[in-house]
Amino acid sequence: MTSKKILLTFLLLNVFVIFYGYVSGFGKSLWVDELLSIIFGRELSGLNLIEKFTQDPHAPFFYFLLNFFQLVLKIFDISVNDNLNLLRLINLIGFIPLLVSYKILKKEKIQININIVFLLLVSSYYFIFYILDLRPYFLLLSFTFLISVINLTNTLEEKHKYLFIISAIILSVFHIYGLAISMSILLYRLLLNFNKKDYRKLRIDIYFMILLFLIFFFSYFLQIINPETMSTLGYMKFKLWFIRAFLGWTLNTAIFLFFSSLFIIFINMQKNLTISLIKDLFKNNIFINIMGQILPVIILLFVVLMASLLIKPIIHFRPLIVIYPSLVLTAGLLAHALFKNYQSKILLLIFLIIVTFVNLNFYLKNIINTGENIEWVIKKTFTKNCKNSDVYYNDDGKVGMLDYVNQIVKIYSKNLRPIKPLSSFDLTKFKDNKKINESCKVLIFSFHTNNLEKYLNKIDYKNLEFEISYAPNVVEENTSKAGAIVLVK
């Protein structure tokens, strides 16, 4: 069997793994950010223009899309709250730019291993997690992949210029990082065309940059000048674990890039390197194409780092999904140069086995299981026999979440009960309330269990006995049960 057939076989095997995970995980509980996105979408129609653009640091266009899909379900007489998971079909839009990207790569005949590109693309936690996530990130991944392919094929200012700018606008209105990667590619193209003295293409790059600047001000200006909205970005202050998370989410690609680079260096070290050979290397099309993918990433990271240091922290490993397509395409370019000898074919087989192992043992459970089993928590807490009994939400000291918690509860249950923050727990009031309804056992509920036990220990329960029941079907079973209820014995 040839290496091409082996690669295609493993590609189909891993696509089947992803498909199995998608079908199995389609009905899993939504997590907090997804539910908040649905709530934001529902609120849009009742807000004025300023409120629409300042309720969240992100531009509201993805929430408009979510709201539109909810209206579509209602048109077909489908209960939205009973069929929330159908909203996940929104992400299928992302397969359109992926299909277009594949056709462009095939037609333009770039020296790239397309099978490796798409194997690595689907074999990433970014792809696997966000394909079912009701956030804009899967659309960011797919449209960024498309504009990166257009940049790679050097068709940005010519045959695919309208496709590029439409995709760049979609990226820009969905997320600030979508705007950043679009502008980074355009800045790279501007410098490239200036160096080539191709002023016709240069003018197109400038026009596109001006248009995206206007999109930036239209989409994000009101958020930037609103101190309350900007204050919510505190969680994006850089932490070292962001790097670990990014590498973990792109593990297969990181492994391939590291070892393929080492192998190529090893092969070239065996040659008698001369100045002319090194010059030829820098003129090589594969090297030029790799630089075309890496330089926009460097520009983006530099801009984000400067903004985070000088203005406001805006760095986080989740939106770094926009640099992942460049890494995948770089891997495809390296693969084309690498898999030309017997030794590299053996390495290819080993790598394919590693990819499949990672997908089956690490990533598959993340697509099947939920991040936070909020549905289970709410349905266990808000039952018919507890309507008049107070319940405490583990606010973990966070301010302003109670209103959203009430709205999230209404999505999953019709049996409402008074909700109070755990930080305001009063033992005397609890005992009085307990007399009203002794059959109601749930005292506290939490969507996420980080610090739950520590937080409980800070409260004076005066020998009040309770037990914690953790949510099932969560990703990390032994370390962090994401979702819990506290029952009084």
Image: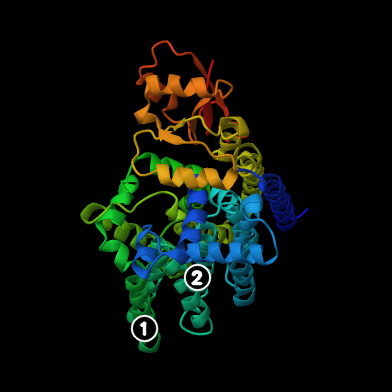
Q: Residue at x 51, y 53 (%)?
A: 264
Residue farthest toward the top in the current orientation of the protein? 463
Q: Residue at x 37, y 23 (%)?
A: 426
Please give left or right for residue 69 compared with residue 406 in the image: right
Q: Which mark is residue 207?
A: 1
Q: Residue at x 40, y 23 (%)?
A: 429
Query: Is residue 204 or residue 73 the one in the foreground?
Result: 73
Q: Is residue 255 visible?
A: no
Query: Is residue 231 or residue 290 the one in the foreground?
Result: 231
Name the element at disc 2.
helix
Name the element at disc 1.
helix
Alpha carbon distance from label 2 to label 1: 17 Å
Q: Is residue 468 above or below residue 447?
A: above
Query: Is residue 121 or residue 132 the one in the foreground?
Result: 132
Residue farthest toward the right in the current orientation of the protein? 1
Q: Mark 1, residues whose alpha carbon is within 10 Å: few (<14), some, or many (≥20)?
A: few
| Residue type for callout 2 | Ile
Q: Residue at x 58, y 29 (%)?
A: 477
Write down the quadrant of residue 296 in the picture: bottom left
**Disc 2 marks which residue?**
147
Query: Is residue 150 or residue 125 the one in the foreground?
Result: 125
